[in-house]
Amino acid sequence: MATVQDVYERHFPSGISPSSWEVWSWFFMRISGLLLVFLVLGHLAIMHVFGGGVERVNFDFVAARWHGIFWRSYDWLLLALALLHGSSGTRTVIHDYVHRDGWRVLAKATLYVATFVFLSVGTLVIVTFDPATLAH
Amino acid sequence: MSPAAGKTEPYHKTRYKGGGGMWSWILHRGTGLMVLGFLFLHILDTSLIGFGKHHYDTFVNIYKTAWFRPLEVLLIGAVIYHSMNGLRVILVDFWDRGVRYERQLSVAVNVVSLVMFVPSAFIMLKPIF
């Protein structure tokens, strides 16, 4: 059976020997992407297209939705995977267009800090939300 | 040719010179960055819910104005295309015959994207007309 490394090298055969980090981030893009197709399209169908779309979204709607653990987990998984997938994709874009070492380090550092901060804020909001203390 | 000091070569030095592959590559990048941009905004707007009902509802009302609806439709289109084209990328990478059917897969991406997008856009735009 072909390993992840084999499949990766079939597509990058130009003599580059990628670090295992490159192989795994490439593989992560495929796995997270596959999961995100279902999570994101489900999210869009529920929140934007059917049942009135964004028109009915407000505090009470979110409070009802986040009453149980299921939608909180769904939303957190979507948050984490989308952010890491997007961050990983942006890293590839930086590698393609930012060639100076200094600027590349700065761009990637900014990206990683932003990813960490936004993942922390998002997680905090989903985990700590308590409608009883906020409904004013 | 060795790279200039302080500079790093791109991972892969391929260059598209036109053709369908180039366009799906450009669209995939563009839609990906666009969706990530909105994700950052979306995390900030959702975090307002931690400040209370008034703050959250006031901000979300901006999204509900007719001005924002076309942007919302654009976002849904970007997500649909990026999702379907991403599935094509996975198939080309992992499916034995993915490369052989690359052209058919590209056509399928465009057709399925449109089939998903057009009715969604219609449902979303109907209330503002």
Image (cartoon, coloured by chain):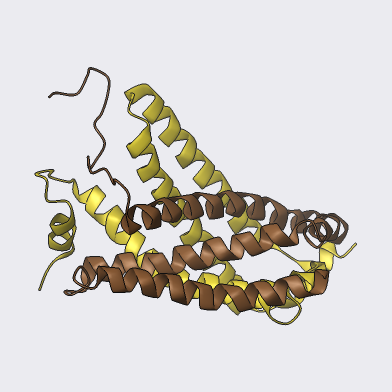
Chain colours: A yellow, B brown
Q: Picture coordinates of residue A95 (x, y %)? A: 33, 38
- Residue furthest to the top: B5
Query: Where, quadrant-wise, is the C terminus of chain B in this rendering?
Result: bottom right
* Residue A110 visible in the picture: yes
Q: Quadrant of residue A97?
A: top left
Q: Is residue B72 above or below residue A68?
A: above
Residue at 18% x, 46% y is A19
Residue B50, how many percent across, how many down?
75, 56
In this rendering, would B17 be left or right of B49?
Answer: left
Residue lying at 9% horizontally and 44% vertically, measured from the top left? A15
Residue A66 in view:
no
Q: Position of residue B16 (x, y in %)?
A: 29, 46
The quadrant where residue B11 appears: top left
Q: Quadrant of the N terminus of chain B?
A: top left
- Picture residue at 37% right of the left edge, 72% below the top: B107
Number of callouts in the render?
0
Residue A52 or residue A115, whichever sits in front = A52
In the displayed orientation, state which residue is furthest to the bottom: A51
Residue in the foreground of this view, choosing between A29 and B117: B117
Residue drawn at x 45%, y 49% is A87
Please say if A23 is above or below B117.
above
Outermost residue, front direction? Answer: B18
